[in-house]
Amino acid sequence: MLKKIYLFYYEGFTNMSKSGKKLWLIIILKLIIMFAILKLFFFENFLNSQFNTDEEKIEYVSKQLTKIKE
């Protein structure tokens, strides 16, 4: 089953036109920029900066997940 899925995508990408491959390259680069670079520079590690112990982090996360919105 996994081999069939792999071959499906492998054949699809090898038979793709040059413009299609360039578009996929642009999409992959945009995803890398969005998730890797922007996260590093704009989103601090909130839990490590606000709490000292793992227990405090666990308690905060569990309260946030179970909090009922009004």
Image (spheres, rainbow, N blue to C red):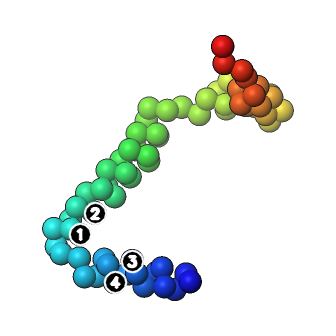
What's the residue at 40%, 39% (across, down)?
Answer: 38
Q: Which amino acid lies under the numbered mark 2 shown in the image of this protein?
A: Trp
Q: Within 10 Å of the Cα at label 3, are there few (<14), some (14-19), or many (20+) other Cα atoms?
A: few
From mark 4 to mark 1, how far is it between C-alphas?
13 Å
Q: Estimate the x, y position of residue 61 in percent, counting from the top left.
A: 73, 31
Which of the 4 quarters of the picture holds residue 12? bottom left
- List the residue tagged with mark 1: 21
Q: How many marks?
A: 4
Q: Secondary structure at mark 1?
A: helix
- List the residue tagged with mark 4: 11
From mark 3 to mark 2, how far is it between C-alphas?
13 Å
- List the residue tagged with mark 2: 24
Q: Within 10 Å of the Cα at label 2, are there few (<14), some (14-19), or many (20+) other Cα atoms?
A: few
From mark 3 to mark 1, how far is it between C-alphas?
13 Å
User: Sequence order check: which comes first, mark 3 or mark 1?
Assistant: 3
In the displayed structure, would residue 50 be above or below residue 3? above
